[in-house]
Amino acid sequence: MITISESAQHHFRSLLSKEPDGTQIRVFITNPGTPMAECGVAYCSIDEVEKSDIRFEYNQFSIYINKDLISFLKNAEIDLIVDKISSQLTLKAPYAKSNIFQKKYSSLEDKIKYFLNVEINPQLLMHGGEVNLIEIDQKNGTAIIQFRGGCNGCSMIGITLKETVEKKLLAAFPEIKKVYDGTEHLHGQHSFY
């Protein structure tokens, strides 16, 4: 899955020895399958492990990855680059930006997630927001979405939902008849407007 060099594993063990017991590592990708995909590594406490995570065990530590990201991390490598001045962890993921969801065998859910990341979220990110697919009720043809960041509580969310998200999803996916906003919108400092 992910190849981690011996020097990078040693570095992880050293970092984790200074953290609270049970702390592990998470590898993540924001905007996977899009030109804006970015990979990262972060600490992961036990209470941050999710049901959708897959655990990969290494010598004295584990790495957690959301199962939806596994195909984007094919042939990924983590290494520690050391020169005379400093050291730096590098994460190379050659498939992070690959459009794997356009293949025929992709599920409707995967295709909608990809569509949101490529067609909708770049616009919303300009205002510090994003939208994610929560679930699809295929019986009723309903996509349930959730807004986050600056979109949560924004005064323009109704227009964004109807004129941007719903209109584009209905046009792109005939299986979807309605888009439902499952966000608990809270007004406050986190909102863009």
Image: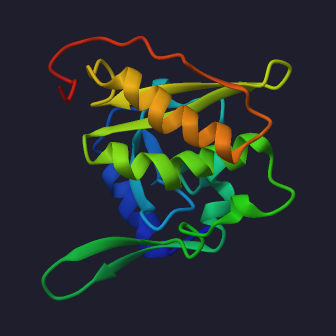
- Residue 64 visible in this rendered orientation of the protein: no
Residue at x-position 38% and y-position 73%: 90
Residue at x-position 41% and y-position 65%: 10
Image spot of residue 111 (x, y percent): 70, 49
Between 35 and 58, the one nearer to me in the picture? 35
Image spot of residue 129 (x, y percent): 33, 37
Can you say whether 55 is above or below 29 in the image? above
Can you say whether 77 is above or below 104 in the image? below
The colouring scheme, among rainbow, by chain, secondary structure or one colour, is rainbow
Residue at x-position 40% and y-position 57%: 40
Q: Is residue 110 left or right of residue 140?
A: left
Q: Is residue 44 left or right of residue 139?
A: left
> In which quadrant is the N terminus drawn?
bottom right
Q: Which image quadrant for residue 50?
A: top right
Q: How many marks?
A: 0
- Residue 11 visible in this rendered orientation of the protein: yes
Image spot of residue 128 (x, y percent): 26, 40
Image spot of residue 180 (x, y percent): 59, 19
Between 91 and 30, the one nearer to me in the picture? 30
Q: Is residue 12 left or right of residue 141?
A: left
Between 23 and 191, the one nearer to me in the picture? 191
Which residue is most to the bottom?
A: 84
Can you say whether 126 is above or below 9 in the image? above
> In which quadrant is the C terminus drawn?
top left
